[in-house]
Image (cartoon, helix red, strand yellow):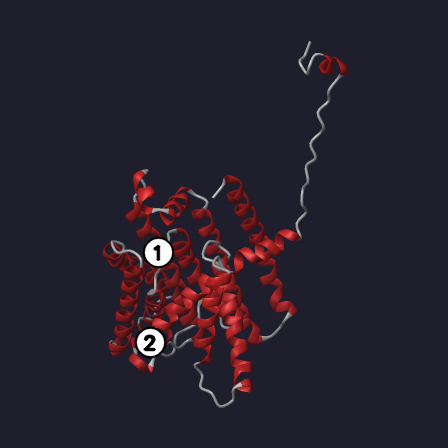
């Protein structure tokens, strides 16, 4: 990527950090609907997971099909600590992130010795193992019956017990995550990750510690997923293992690809596209196909994934950036024509 392109990406991401908070702030005022708030709370939670995955997939070039496991680790850690042991949900969220980070290190060290499809299959296997543990440790997690009575988050006596309050809480975390990711991407670590994504052999040749950077971004993405899982648990107050199965990991991957894995805004765009399209399917598909089962969502997103990979391999983010750039003022620079005097013409252009 050229220096000019990097400046453009940095400039656009900075503008997004101004525009998106304004839109989020005025949304509940413009559309005072509990349903809309619920939808955008889920968009924010999914965007947090995809934020970490964007750095892992788009910038480090590593595919993970096991992030639902870290999502579930955060949810169950926070739920158990706050409900079973009666501690603050904030402590549960921090502990969940630490546990997810430690497990990511343990899993990542052997896993990142693999490449290509083997890496994806290894992370998928890890996700299935964690999903099974959630179901089998019934005394701790509640098993298939689920975990009930998770308390709401409280900050200095202020309880986030309504959709409006939780909406703002989730999106504060999303903005912090985007700023954090943005700073990493435009730092020395980000340049190292882009070099690894481009060519691991070339990166190794110039002295980049490939294992170190891949492991760091994997741990970071796991902690993002854990935080999102904690926010989900304290919002819905009930969780069960089915929320953290292999299909959830695949849906996260679909969100990243649809949004654009090479843009920090791809996580928000992909999560919004997935949730909004999913809600539209729930409303209109039973009307169009009244006698069919509920598996049409999997079919629809499978087709959408294939279409995106063929016609928009970089996702929706670059397309939206093109539309946005059309509304910006184009600066046209006109060069002054060369001034030539009579003496220069007579002497063949040389100064006398």
Residue 25 placement (x, y as % from top left): 60, 62
Q: Residue at x 51, y 80 (%)?
A: 282
Quadrant position of the C terminus in the picture? top right
Name which quarter of the figure residue 120 lies in.
bottom left
Report the front residue among 133 and 304: 304
Specify the label residue 62 is tagged with: 1
Judging from the image, what secondary structure is the residue with disc 1 in? loop
Residue 285 placement (x, y as % from top left): 53, 82
Left or right, 128 with reference to 60 = left
Left or right, 30 with reference to 108 = right
Name which quarter of the figure residue 321 lies in.
bottom right
Whether residue 156 is visible here, answered yes or no, is no
Question: What residue did someone put label 2 on?
Answer: 241
Q: CA distance from mark 1 to mark 2?
A: 26 Å
Q: Residue at x 42, y 70 (%)?
A: 232
Q: Residue at x 28, y 77 (%)?
A: 135
Residue 28 placement (x, y as % from top left): 61, 68
Report the front residue among 110 and 224: 110
Specify the label residue 153 is tagged with: none
User: Mark 1 Cα within 10 Å, few/some/many (few <14, many 20+)?
Assistant: many
Q: Residue furthest bottom?
A: 291
Left or right, 110 with reference to 98 = left
| In the rendered image, the vertical position of residue 170 relative to residue 56, given as above or below | below
Q: Residue at x 26, y 79 (%)?
A: 138
Q: Residue furthest left?
A: 110
Report the front residue among 90 and 44: 44
Residue 106 placement (x, y as % from top left): 24, 58
| In the rendered image, the vertical position of residue 146 relative to residue 93, given as above or below | below
Whether residue 290 is visible here, answered yes or no, is yes
């Amino acid at each position: 990527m050229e220096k000019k392109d990097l400046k453009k990406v940095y400039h656009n991401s900075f503008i997004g950090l101004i525009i998106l908070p304004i839109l989020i702030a005025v949304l509940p005022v413009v559309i005072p609907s509990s349903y809309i708030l619920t939808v955008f709370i889920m968009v924010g939670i999914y965007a947090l997971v995809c934020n970490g995955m964007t750095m892992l997939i788009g910038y480090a070039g590593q595919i993970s099909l096991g992030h639902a496991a870290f999502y579930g680790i955060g949810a169950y850690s926070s739920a158990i600590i706050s409900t079973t042991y009666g501690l603050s949900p904030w402590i549960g969220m921090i502990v969940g992130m630490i546990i997810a980070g430690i497990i990511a290190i343990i899993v990542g060290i052997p896993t990142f010795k693999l490449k290509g499809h083997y890496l994806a299959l290894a992370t998928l296997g890890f996700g299935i193992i964690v999903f099974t543990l959630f179901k089998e440790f019934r005394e701790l997690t509640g098993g298939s019956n689920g975990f009930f009575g998770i308390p709401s988050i409280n900050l200095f006596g202020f309880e986030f017990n309504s959709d409006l309050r939780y909406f703002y809480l989730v999106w504060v975390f999303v903005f912090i995550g985007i700023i954090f990711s943005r700073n990493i991407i435009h730092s020395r670590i980000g340049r190292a990750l882009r070099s690894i994504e481009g060519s691991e052999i070339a990166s190794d040749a110039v002295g980049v510690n490939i294992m170190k950077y891949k492991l760091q971004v994997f741990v970071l993405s796991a902690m993002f997923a854990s935080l999102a899982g904690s926010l989900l648990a304290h919002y819905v107050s009930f969780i069960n293992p089915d929320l953290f199965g292999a299909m959830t990991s695949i849906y996260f991957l679909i969100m990243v690809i649809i949004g654009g894995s090479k843009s920090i805004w791809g996580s928000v765009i992909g999560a919004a596209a997935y949730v909004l399209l999913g809600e539209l399917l729930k409303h209109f598909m039973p009307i169009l196909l009244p006698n069919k089962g509920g598996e049409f969502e999997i079919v629809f997103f499978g087709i959408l994934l294939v279409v995106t990979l063929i016609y928009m391999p970089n996702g929706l983010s670059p397309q939206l950036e093109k539309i946005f750039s059309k509304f910006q003022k184009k600066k046209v620079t006109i060069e002054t024509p060369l001034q030539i005097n009579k003496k220069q013409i007579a002497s063949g252009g040389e100064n006398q």
